[in-house]
């Protein structure tokens, strides 16, 4: 999946040559270099964040092609929109926001049933927006209700990692618990949500 998306990026970005950026650059430095047209910076950003984005996208759709297209579109959008990024949030959250929107946008053109239940509940916000409408209001409402029934710690873990796009490390730091604890809470929360969603 990642190799195909990288090939598509190579063919469509029209990026300039390397400007001296290295793999030790921070995410913010990479985005600034991407904004300046540095192809190497885009490749490094892709290598750093493409794998986990690919995994999250693949987990939210039953269509491998849709996930691949969303991943490719995410980095194309990052290439085109890097100048608009002002460092007000973390780069992984910025990329995940782009990826979610691209997946939802692509899903609107797909036949019903090509998305998993996790996508339908992508946002906790009870006011359904265009993404939720595209992904199915009934399922979205059921998932929000199931999340609302979770114990506080599990709901906080799901909200941080699934809905807000935080990493396990970020969620652990925000709540002051070990990463293993966050993983355990996520696992229990997902099991409970699946039980509630069963017919």
Image (spheres, grey):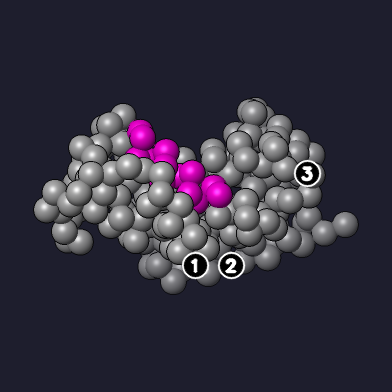
Q: Is residue 72 magenta?
A: yes
Provide residue 161's location: percent of width, then percent of height: 49, 53
Q: Residue at x 78, y 55 (%)?
A: 197
Q: Quadrant of residue 175?
A: bottom left
Is there CB contact under 8 Å for labels 1 and 3?
no
Residue at which label 1 appears? 183
- Residue beneath disc 3: 111
Query: Can the viewer see residue 163 in this picture?
Result: no
Horizontally, residue 25 falls left or right of residue 147, namely left
Seen at 55% across and 49% down, the residue is: 69
Q: Which residue is mark 2?
A: 187
Residue at the extreme right of the image, as rendered: 199
**From which residue to which does the magenta span run?**
69-81
138 vs 65, left or right, is right
Between marks 2 and 1, how big is the CA–CA gap? 6 Å
Please report contact status of discs 2 and 1: CB closer than 8 Å, yes or no: yes
Structural distance between the alpha carbons of marks 1 and 3: 33 Å
Rendered location of residue 163, percent (x, y): 53, 46
Give coordinates of residue 121: x percent, y percent: 65, 45
Is the stretch drawn in magenta largely helix, strand or loop? helix
């Amino acid at each position: 999946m990642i190799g195909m998306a990288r090939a598509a990026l190579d063919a469509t970005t029209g990026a300039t040559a390397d400007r001296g950026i290295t793999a030790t650059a921070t995410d913010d430095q990479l985005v600034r270099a991407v904004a300046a047209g540095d192809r190497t910076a885009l490749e490094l950003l892709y290598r750093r964040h493409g794998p986990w984005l690919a995994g999250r996208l693949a987990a939210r759709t039953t269509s491998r092609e849709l996930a691949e297209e969303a991943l490719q579109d995410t980095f194309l959008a990052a290439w085109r929109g890097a100048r608009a990024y002002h460092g007000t949030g973390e780069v992984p959250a910025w990329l995940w926001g782009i990826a979610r929107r691209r997946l939802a946008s692509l899903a609107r053109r797909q036949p019903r049933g090509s998305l998993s239940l996790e996508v339908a509940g992508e946002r906790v916000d009870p006011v359904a927006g265009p993404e939720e409408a595209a992904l199915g209001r009934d399922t979205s409402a059921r998932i929000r209700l199931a999340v609302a029934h979770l114990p506080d710690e599990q709901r906080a873990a799901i909200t941080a990692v699934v809905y807000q796009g935080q990493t396990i490390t970020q969620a652990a730091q925000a709540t002051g618990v070990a990463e293993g604890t966050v993983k355990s809470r996520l696992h229990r929360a997902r099991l409970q949500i699946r039980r509630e969603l069963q017919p």
